[in-house]
Amino acid sequence: MKWQGPILGPIRKAFQTVLTNYWAWREGPTTAHAVQVGGLAPSDSLQVPMNLVMPLRDTTAVGRANAMAAIGASIQELFVGLDNVGTVHFARFDIVDGNLCMMSIFDGDPRGYIRDFIALFGNVFDALMEIVVDPPTTPCEEHVDEFLDWIMAHDAFQIPGAITEEFPGLKRVANAPRDLVLAMHEQPNVQLGIYRGYPGFSAAQVRDRLGVGW
């Protein structure tokens, strides 16, 4: 019998929720952790992904319009800052399902990457923090460590290339669904994989070879 339909579907969902909560209570926190540097990168600290998912305080059409206006008012300053940082391959700003998202590929350490941004235009971050849920203390230039911790907490969980290294239980087939379910129970936002068309090159090397400059 398939658990589908107007009655069985909700029952199945409720059963899955109860089972997941039971597993989480019995097993405790998973050992998986966000991959920030290495592991995914073709060489140390090159082309590192960051996927910030920041829930908007107001997810109505008006709230999302205000978020668009806030980004639009700062977008050129953001782009100039991305150029001046000198380690960024790509970056984009999106609103997805009530979240303000900043997706980027950069070279170096995530905390150093954000510190560079704070030094260049901390005031832009301060403005963005006014429209998100549970923001850190501002101005961020005066509360750098708190701001960095907040950013790291909103960086989507990254599944490593060798998934069994992050989830040892997956080596035992019977544990695979449970381990993955528990990880997803703790991590609402996940990066499943990343492809690199030119692995092993820094942003500076690419721009230099293309003659783009800064």
Image (cartoon, helix red, strand yellow):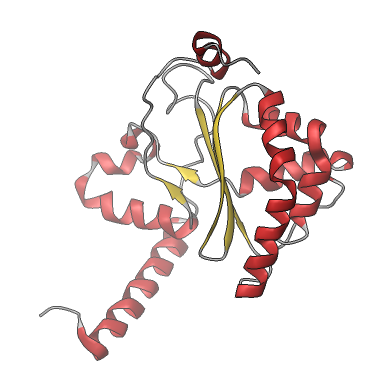
Q: Is residue 136 visible?
A: no
Q: Position of residue 146 (x, y in %)?
A: 78, 45
Residue at screen point 36% across, 41% down: 167
In the displayed structure, 41 sits above or below 149; it is above
Q: Pick whichever, 75 or 28, lies toward us.
A: 75
The extreme bottom residue here reads: 7
The extreme left residue here reads: 1
The extreme front residue here reads: 211
Residue 178 appears left or right of 122: left
Q: Position of residue 130 (x, y in %)?
A: 78, 59
Residue 64 appears left or right of 42: right
Q: Pick whichever, 52 or 85, lies toward us.
A: 85
Q: Pick whichever, 16 or 31, lies toward us.
A: 16
Residue at screen point 61% across, 71% down: 59
Residue at screen point 38% across, 73% down: 17
In the displayed structure, 13 sits above or below 184; it is below
Q: Position of residue 193 (x, y in %)?
A: 37, 39
In the displayed structure, 183 sits above or below 192; it is below
Residue 142 appears left or right of 29: right
- In the rendered image, the quadrant that contains the N terminus is bottom left
Q: Quadrant of residue 196?
A: top left
- In the rendered image, the quadrant that contains the C terminus is top right
Residue at screen point 55% across, 10% down: 208
Q: Pick whichever, 116 or 182, lies toward us.
A: 116
Q: Is residue 165 visible?
A: yes
Q: How many marks?
A: 0
Q: Position of residue 168 (x, y in %)?
A: 34, 38
